[in-house]
Amino acid sequence: MSAHDRADSAHDRGDSAHDRAESAQDRADSSTPILTVAGLSAHIGGQQVVEQVDFEVPPLGVTAVLGRNGVGKTSTIKAILGLIDRKGEVTFAGQRIDHEPTHRIVQRGVGYVPEDREVFGSLTVAENLKLATRTDNPRTDLVDKLFPELRQRAQQRAGTLSGGQQQMVSLARALINPNKLLLVDEPTKGLAPKIVTEVAEALAEASATTPVLLVEQNLTVVERLAQRVIVIDSGRVVHTGGAAELFADPDQIQRLLGVHTETSEENPAQ
Ligand SMILES: Nc1ncnc2c1ncn2[C@@H]1O[C@H](COP(=O)(O)OP(=O)(O)OP(=O)(O)O)[C@@H](O)[C@H]1O
């Protein structure tokens, strides 16, 4: 072996060690939760609506928050954002945020799509998006790709859009910013099946680059999108685990959510 070859081979070994170190770092990054919630509690009007909630959101994919009506799903999201008074630990991207005001949490890169798709009805679609933009590099290409219809309707007042189109504006207002985490509350509520599919597809695409914590009642959407599930009952976490495992166990879904789901054996047509 020539000196040159030896040098090359040492260089190769050095590179591969460097690669190994990088891939160990990648593995650590890909397993470090983007959000950790520990002992989170919140009250509204004297009633405890979130009670000692613990869970983690991985840095990739969709984590679904499930539970019957009124169990505290929305309150949990609002407590994370500091929209309601809370106690406990919330760590986002390695930093404690539980004593921070909402605007600072949002500035850190937490996007929020609230329930009931609030849009500014008297403003156009384009104006709604301009108002929501808090970056010099808005992700206009992504929004145009996910919601081509909004581009065509840029000059239409948001209040005159259909419910599904308003939901798209609501999602687009969050997605136009480069978030590190998206909190999305019941995005398919009250929408027609075709629009539910479109919204689910947009969220699937968004979740390829940004982790999503998704409150969702539509189990078909959850099964399509989520890798992890958190089930809440009476303000407490009663189950966490893989989505596939939960959907393989209709008895557990019935027990946790009071919903009967058919397995493919029961209904081979599905
Ligand atoms: N502003 C408020 N004033 C009084 N009670 C409230 C308020 N907001 C929420 N609650 C109560 O807190 C509890 C939890 O509500 P929350 O909206 O978090 O539940 P949820 O699981 O998101 O429900 P849903 O699935 O029906 O949207 C409920 O009993 C609700 O009535």
Image: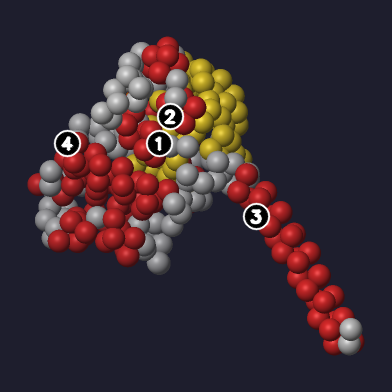
Q: Label 2: state its secondary structure.
A: strand
Callout 4 crowding tier (Cα within 10 Å): few <14, some 14–19, many ≥20:
few
Question: Is disc 1 placed on a helix, strand or loop?
Answer: strand
Q: Is residue 233 visible?
A: no
Say which quarter of the image contains residue 19.
Answer: bottom right
Indicate the quadrant containing the N terminus: top left, top right, bottom left or bottom right.
bottom right
Above or below, 120 relative to 178: above
Label 3 to label 1: alpha-carbon separation: 25 Å
Residue position for label 1: 214
Q: Which mark is residue 65?
A: 2
Percent across and percent down for residue 23 are: 68, 57
Spatial CA span between label 3 and label 2:
27 Å
Instruction: Find residue 165 and report its horizontal and vertical position in percent.
Output: 18, 47
Per the model, the C-alpha gap separating discs 4 and 2 is: 22 Å
Would you name the residue on which mark 4 appears? 192
Q: Please indicate, yes or no, whether residue 94 appears anywhere in the rendered image.
A: yes
Image depth: mark 3 or mark 2 in front: 3
Pointer 2 with pointer 1, Cβ within 8 A:
yes
Say which amino acid is labelled 2. Val
Q: Earlier in the sequence, mark 2 or mark 1?
A: 2
First in sequence: mark 3 vs mark 1: 3
Nearer to me, 103 or 243: 243
